[in-house]
Image (tube, grey):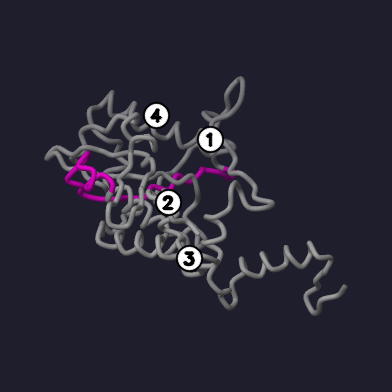
Amino acid sequence: MITKDPLTLTGRKLGALVLPDFCERCYWIREHLEGDPPFAIPMPGIFNSIDAQTKHVVHAYFTKHGHAPEWLSEIGNDLESYVDGGLLSWRRYSYHDPKTGVLLRGSPDDIFIARDGSHCLVDYKTARWTPAQDRLLPMYAIQVNAYAYIAERARTFRPMRSVTLVYCEPVTGDIPAHDSTNHQPRGFKLGFAPKVVPVELDLAQIPPLMRRAREILSLDKPPERKLGCEGCYAIADLFFVHDGVLFTKDRAKK
């Protein structure tokens, strides 16, 4: 069990609680592991590079023009500047909730400052907007609301006016492939088409999720298996295989 105070959680870990296929047992096991689960594949570093470059491009536009790029106009036409990225580092961007003992932390990609002094929080996703991404939307929505909650409770960047997801979709296919402007002497250019997805700003949903996470992770042993949970089946299979029991789709055999 996890009884330490503070219990450190990220916005995404908090968001996992609202996924349609959420399983308390898998959540408990995953958070009690020291290190990554077996056979986990780390996320390729290229996504971090693209994410960092996205912020560089947006900030360069602000510096040159004094306002946000046109493709961010859905967030507002009054965005005049941005918060320095150093202030959004996960080492600094956090809030310790005294009621639950949860240390909520994270690193939002951008916070823009509007003309009236309000703030608009943005998180970039290097991905296409697909049904699979839509399935993850509840988790991402909690993630950005958790970031906004930190800003409000820590009294750093407030008031918070909006939270938004921006999907940066790579522009691929025959047309860009044959576009001569994409051909460079030492390589090629790959464009991205941003898709702005507004998220409801609802900070009231964060405290109950912190309480629930604390309750689950403070249990002495993992909760019971969830019927139909693929994660629970996979964990059970690991133990069976470890004991020399191999499975087929139809039956188990020694």
Q: Mark 4 or mark 2, which has the lower sequence index? A: 2
Instruction: Report which residue position mark 1 lands on.
Output: 190
> Neighbour class for label 1 at 10 Å: few (<14), some, many (≥20)?
few
**Amino acid type of the residue that numbered disc 2 sits on in the rendered structure:** Lys
Q: CA distance from mark 4 to mark 1?
A: 16 Å
Instruction: Report which residue position mark 3 lands on.
Output: 219
Label 2 sits on a secondary structure element that is loop
Q: Mark 1 or mark 2, which has the lower sequence index? A: 2
Using the image as rendered, state which of residue 216 and residue 237 is in the foreground: 216
Q: Mark 3 or mark 4, which has the lower sequence index? A: 4
Residue 194 appears anywhere in the view: yes
Work out which quarter of the rendered image holds the C terminus and state it: bottom right
Residue 16 coordinates in the image, percent (x, y): 45, 60
Q: Are marks 2 and 3 in contact (CB under 8 Å)?
A: no
Q: Are marks 1 and 2 in contact (CB under 8 Å)?
A: no
Give the side of residue 116 with respect to residue 189, left or right.
left
**Amino acid type of the residue that numbered disc 1 sits on in the rendered structure:** Leu
Residue 15 coordinates in the image, percent (x, y): 41, 58
Instruction: Report which residue position mark 2 lands on.
Output: 4
Using the image as rendered, state which of residue 24 and residue 70 is in the foreground: 24
Label 4 sits on a secondary structure element that is helix
**Amino acid type of the residue that numbered disc 3 sits on in the rendered structure:** Leu
Q: Mark 3 or mark 1, which has the lower sequence index? A: 1
Q: CA distance from mark 3 to mark 4?
A: 43 Å
Instruction: Report which residue position mark 4 lands on.
Output: 56
Image: magenta residue range: 150-174
Mark whose residue sits in front, 3 or 1 = 3
Q: CA distance from mark 4 to mark 2?
A: 38 Å
Label 1 sits on a secondary structure element that is loop
Residue displayed at 56% across by 64% down: 26
Q: CA distance from mark 2 to mark 3?
A: 12 Å
